[in-house]
Image (tube, rainbow, N blue to C red):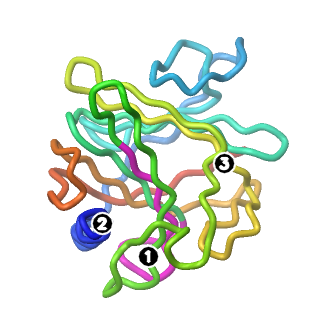
Amino acid sequence: MIGIVLAFLVFAAGCASDPVTPPAPVDDAPITEEWVPDGIIEPGEYQYSQRLSDSMEIHWSTTDETIQMAISGQATGWVGIGLGTPRMMAGVDYIAGYVDSETVVVHDLYSQSPRCPIQMDTEIGGSNDILRSGGSLVDGVTTIEFERLFVTGDEFDYLIRQGEEIAIIWAVSDSNSMTVPHRESSTATIILWR
């Protein structure tokens, strides 16, 4: 647990680099099948996608009450995303995960401020609000998929609102150990609906 906290402190500290302005999100094909968080991104599985860098992209769809998201990075370790703040400000809702052999680990996390370690929501009085998750590690690319409610009722989760621009921070690592710093990180802005 301490390892997770230390690694995410390093994760957040590295996210203060200048933001990369990615291209606008791309509308994918209409949703064609029931969503399954298996770590494999199929054509038509997500409504939107956005390339954040040469080594990181995200995909997402929305239902009436949830967001379904894939974080895919050219990394053999953990990948993570923080919702709700530019750079390193207080109150960041993080979701990060990795694949260890056949085991997929996805964490619901929070950082109270840049000087505080990132902790699991459950360690600070919140709840784990990941409804479903899965992932894969294939040819040096880690993909984590998860689903959560827009409004979880957990004070440590970002409240997602329709049409709002959401500042995100993201990072990738070549280690499953959360104590190993990220290899690459940056910030971006996404709009979950149009």
Classify residue 157 as left or right of residue 194: left
Viewer-proximal residue among 101 and 192: 101
| Number of residue marks | 3
Q: CA distance from mark 2 to mark 1?
A: 9 Å
Viewer-proximal residue among 13 and 167: 13
Q: Mark 3 or mark 1, which has the lower sequence index?
A: 1
Answer whether residue 140 is magenta in the image: no
Q: Quadrant of the C terminus?
A: top right
Image coordinates for residue 35, horizontal then vertical, percent: 67, 23
Compared to residue 99, the image places residue 186 above or below, namely: below
Q: Residues within 10 Å of mark 3 (few under 14, many from 20)?
A: many
Image coordinates for residue 162, horizontal then vertical, percent: 76, 55
Q: Which quadrant would residue 37 be assigned to in this image? A: top right
Q: Mark 2 or mark 1, which has the lower sequence index?
A: 2
Q: Residues within 10 Å of mark 2 (few under 14, many from 20)?
A: many
Q: Mark 2 or mark 3, which has the lower sequence index?
A: 2
Q: Are dots 2 and 1 in contact, CB under 8 Å?
A: yes
Residue type at numbered disc 3: Arg
Residue type at numbered disc 2: Phe
> Which residue has dot 1 on it?
111
Secondary structure at badge 3 equals strand
> Which residue has dot 2 on it?
8
Image coordinates for residue 12, horizontal then vertical, percent: 30, 70
Read off the magenta span: 84-97
Q: CA distance from mark 2 to mark 3?
A: 21 Å
Classify residue 185 as left or right of residue 118: left
> Which residue has dot 3 on it?
148
Q: Are dots 2 and 3 in contact, CB under 8 Å?
A: no
* Residue at 48% from the left image edge and 70% from the top image edge: 110
